[in-house]
């Protein structure tokens, strides 16, 4: 069979040279393992010479060693791996000497097997133990996940099959061929090393850690908190404890790396879960009891013989919320918190500026379907999209969204909808107003310009500084998404390559902060002032004492009714001399169209999708400036109904014609002046609607750039639809859409943007 494949390869060599972007590869079924193995080896050998070594060296070497492994050139693959390590020494890579260690072990074991000195399994086990015996806890933790697939072997096999499916007429694009080789190698390597590594990792873990994985802490009201605890086997005296309190429970040992992380950094570790999760027999109601329960867990911690009575907390999203929830009644043993991308119930989830968003609806099932997490259900994107689409097409009240799933009443969802105001239900979950003034521990907040949790994170930050003038509270913010702002940023986020100086390890900074507070070490060097932010496009961090000092000037731009020379209306620096308006009409009964503020998962766009909104464009910037902070403003409007949900999206129109997404605001007009009390609009009267709770951004604008604002009304499957009747929006339906919404946007409306020149 191998000879036949070689003959075919030689016969079609001319075809490969005539069409250098295409490589010959016979159409083979993935199940035909013998033929596939031979064909993959030949393919890898051929395309090794076609890889471009002049571009990204890391990418080139990463592809090269994979191809060499598939080709059976294990010694050369080891050499390429060592070249990657040498390339990354002195850079941002963590532990460069351990990069691709699992593949190196595989290659060495293959060479020992080929020499018949040892079986593959014996050689792999021997090398594994040798490597791990020389690692400290932090290094071992860092690479322990390298030997296990993130999503499972079945997914790796599916990736391989999808790559094989791209073969057409016995040829494949070079890029697809490289991906095919990578997917083939991943499947082959992990199919072999994962079952070998599991018991070895367990043995290493037992040697390094004392782990309690089935703790059940009883609370004062008779509920139970499921928890894990860990410490090093070499502990000689009580330690400070790092506590993570989460709703994201996973069975042992899946979530073990989260538990071991603080131990590897020199602390005792406790991970505890929202009541009802893990081993807790109680019912799950997110957000409602966590503040109380965190403090019960801290009580338990400080009574343990391995505790020195000091506790610190960190974590992102829901875990960021639990830290703030605990400070509502601050425990004296809690010495610092590091909330990242923090959720703020009632303020950014499930609603922002009082508009309930549907992205969180599947999450309620994700965290409550069982005692752990229902990944399969949550990741069924097609199903959840269909639920939203059906609801939108049917025009049912938002309150009936759960009925479309066919699962009956969703108690969590329904309980949330009972509280459209930011009322006592939400206020009881986190510190409220003067309660922030009692928070006297140091705090480090991390978030990102593209972090969906930024609204929550900044609420806590602003309120803490407002009510405690002496608060020791540092902010670190950059071009990060929700996950990157919690740990390690993506070098390329949603298609945008972040500046090199922004590519930092927030995870490392968090532990530097803990050492600073708990071990009298030095403060993280990046925290040069209270507000630390990276200016996109400048490759520079800025450090200022307050949010207000991010910019040194405010510019006011009016939403003019005059046409711009560019497409749209003019975003003008001049206040209009005459009162006029633009008329927008939205027919909520028409489900063939959508009005929205949503942008796809990207930052830079070739063309602008306005979502049926109105576009305003400024004159070109004459000098380089940077936008630093959150935009705000006031809308002068007249509508024929009593309410509306509206949005403003801010872009930079770059000189090359592309659009750079900067920030947005979305909110409900009737809550514009007070999120805790609804005030309906008066039909036919001009109203002043202020807005301010937008996303902070920082971006250098080059000469010739323009600012773009897209103003719109919400009408989409992605959030509630406010029909403007004045009833509870969750009870409104398409039956309330008989009269289209008519909005007169007056040209005295404006946006205010903080800049620095």
Image: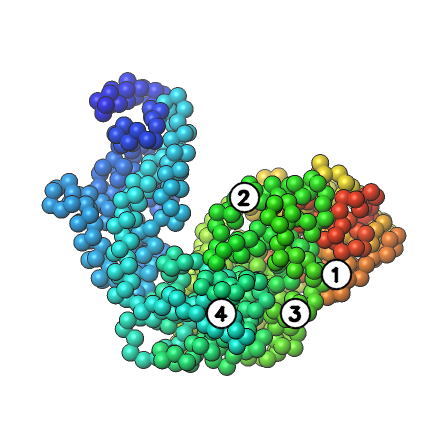
Q: Residue at x 68, y 58 (%)?
A: 417
Question: Could you say where residue 530 lies in the image, as x and y percent from the top left?
Answer: 54, 71
Question: Could you say where residue 602 lies in the image, as x and y percent from the top left?
Answer: 55, 45
**Mark 4 or 3 closer to N-term?**
4
Please name which of the two marks, 3 or 1, marks the residue nearer to the observer: 3
Q: Which residue matches tag 1? A: 672
Task: Report helix, strand or loop for mark 4.
Answer: strand
Task: Report helix, strand or loop for mark 1.
Answer: loop
Quarter of the picture holding the C terminus? bottom right
Q: Residue at x 43, y 69 (%)?
A: 216
Give yes or no for contact between labels 4 and 3 (Cβ–Cβ under 8 Å): no
Between 680 and 247, the one nearer to me in the picture = 247
Q: Is residue 77 left or right of residue 680?
A: left
Question: Could you say where residue 449 lies in the image, as x and y percent from the top left?
Answer: 56, 57
**Label 1 CA crowd tier, 10 Å (few <14, some 14–19, many 20+):** many
Query: Where residue 224 is drawn, which disc sits there?
Result: 4
Q: Which residue matches tag 2? A: 381
Q: Which residue matches tag 3? A: 427
**Mark 3 or 1 closer to N-term?**
3
């Amino acid at each position: 069979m191998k000879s036949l494949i070689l003959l075919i390869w030689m016969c079609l060599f001319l075809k490969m040279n005539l069409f250098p972007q295409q490589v010959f590869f016979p159409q083979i079924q993935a199940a035909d393992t013998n033929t596939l193995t031979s064909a993959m080896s030949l393919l890898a050998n051929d395309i090794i010479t076609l890889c471009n070594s002049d571009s990204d060296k890391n990418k080139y070497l990463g592809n090269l060693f994979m191809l060499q492994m598939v080709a059976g050139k294990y010694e050369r693959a080891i050499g390429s791996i060592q070249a990657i390590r040498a390339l990354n020494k002195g850079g941002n890579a963590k532990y460069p000497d351990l990069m691709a260690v699992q593949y190196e072990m595989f290659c060495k074991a293959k060479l020992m097997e080929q020499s018949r000195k040892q079986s593959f399994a014996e050689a792999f086990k021997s090398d594994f133990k040798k490597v791990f015996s020389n690692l400290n806890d932090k290094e071992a933790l860092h690479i322990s996940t390298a030997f296990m697939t993130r999503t499972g072997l079945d997914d790796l096999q599916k990736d391989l099959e999808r790559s094989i499916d791209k073969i057409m007429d016995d040829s494949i694009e070079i890029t697809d061929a490289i991906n095919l080789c990578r997917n083939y190698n991943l499947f082959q390597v992990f199919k072999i090393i994962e079952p070998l590594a599991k018991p070895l990792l367990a043995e290493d873990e037992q040697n390094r850690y004392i782990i309690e994985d089935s703790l059940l802490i009883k609370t004062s009201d008779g509920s139970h908190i499921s928890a894990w605890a860990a410490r090093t086997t070499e502990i000689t005296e009580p330690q400070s404890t790092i506590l993570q309190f989460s709703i994201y429970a996973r069975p042992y040992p899946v979530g073990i790396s989260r538990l071991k992380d603080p131990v590897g950094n020199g602390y005792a570790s406790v991970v505890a879960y929202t009541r009802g999760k893990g081993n807790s027999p109680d019912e799950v109601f997110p957000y409602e009891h966590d503040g109380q329960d965190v403090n019960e867990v801290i009580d338990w911690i400080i009574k343990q013989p391995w505790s020195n009575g000091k506790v610190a907390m960190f974590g992102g999203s829901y875990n960021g919320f639990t830290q703030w929830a605990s400070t509502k009644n601050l425990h004296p043993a809690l010495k610092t918190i590091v909330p990242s991308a923090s959720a703020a119930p009632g303020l950014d989830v499930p609603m922002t500026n009082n508009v309930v968003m549907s992205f969180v609806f599947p999450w309620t099932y994700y965290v409550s379907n069982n005692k752990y997490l229902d990944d399969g259900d949550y990741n069924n994107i097609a199903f959840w999209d269909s639920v939203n689409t059906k609801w939108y097409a049917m025009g049912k009240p938002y309150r009936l969204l759960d009925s479309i799933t066919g699962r009956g009443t969703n108690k969590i969802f329904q309980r949330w909808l009972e509280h459209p105001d930011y009322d006592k239900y939400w206020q009881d979950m986190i510190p409220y107003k003067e309660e922030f003034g009692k928070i006297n521990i140091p705090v480090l907040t991390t978030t990102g310009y593209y972090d969906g949790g930024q609204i929550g994170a900044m609420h806590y930050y602003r309120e803490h500084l407002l009510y405690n003038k002496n608060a020791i509270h540092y902010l670190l913010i950059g071009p990060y998404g929700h996950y990157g702002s919690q740990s390690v940023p993506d070098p390329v986020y949603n298609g945008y390559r972040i500046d090199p100086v922004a590519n930092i390890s927030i995870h490392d900074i968090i532990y530097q902060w803990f050492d600073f507070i708990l071990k009298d070490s030095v403060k993280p060097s990046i925290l040069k002032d209270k507000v630390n932010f990276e200016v996109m496009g400048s490759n520079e961090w800025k450090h200022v004492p307050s949010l207000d000092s991010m910019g040194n000037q405010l510019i006011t731009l009016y939403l003019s009714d005059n046409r711009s020379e560019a497409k749209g209306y003019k975003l003008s620096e001049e206040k209009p001399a005459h009162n006029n308006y633009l008329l927008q009409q939205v027919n909520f009964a028409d489900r063939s169209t959508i009005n929205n503020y949503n942008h796809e998962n990207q930052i830079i766009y070739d063309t602008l999708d306005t979502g049926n909104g109105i576009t305003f464009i400024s004159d070109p910037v004459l000098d380089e400036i940077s936008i630093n902070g959150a935009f705000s403003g006031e809308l002068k409007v007249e509508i024929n109904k009593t309410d509306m949900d509206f949005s403003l999206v801010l872009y930079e129109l770059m000189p090359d014609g592309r659009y750079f997404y900067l920030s947005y605001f979305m909110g409900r007009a009737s809550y514009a002046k007070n999120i805790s009390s609804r005030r309906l609009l008066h039909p036919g009267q001009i109203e002043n609607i202020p807005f301010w709770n937008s996303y902070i951004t920082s971006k250098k604008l080059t000469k010739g750039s323009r600012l773009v604002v897209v103003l719109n009304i919400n009408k989409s499957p992605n959030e509630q639809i406010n029909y403007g009747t004045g009833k509870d929006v969750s009870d409104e339906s398409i039956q309330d859409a008989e009269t289209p919404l008519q909005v007169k946007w007056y040209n005295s409306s404006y946006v205010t943007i903080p800049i620095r020149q």
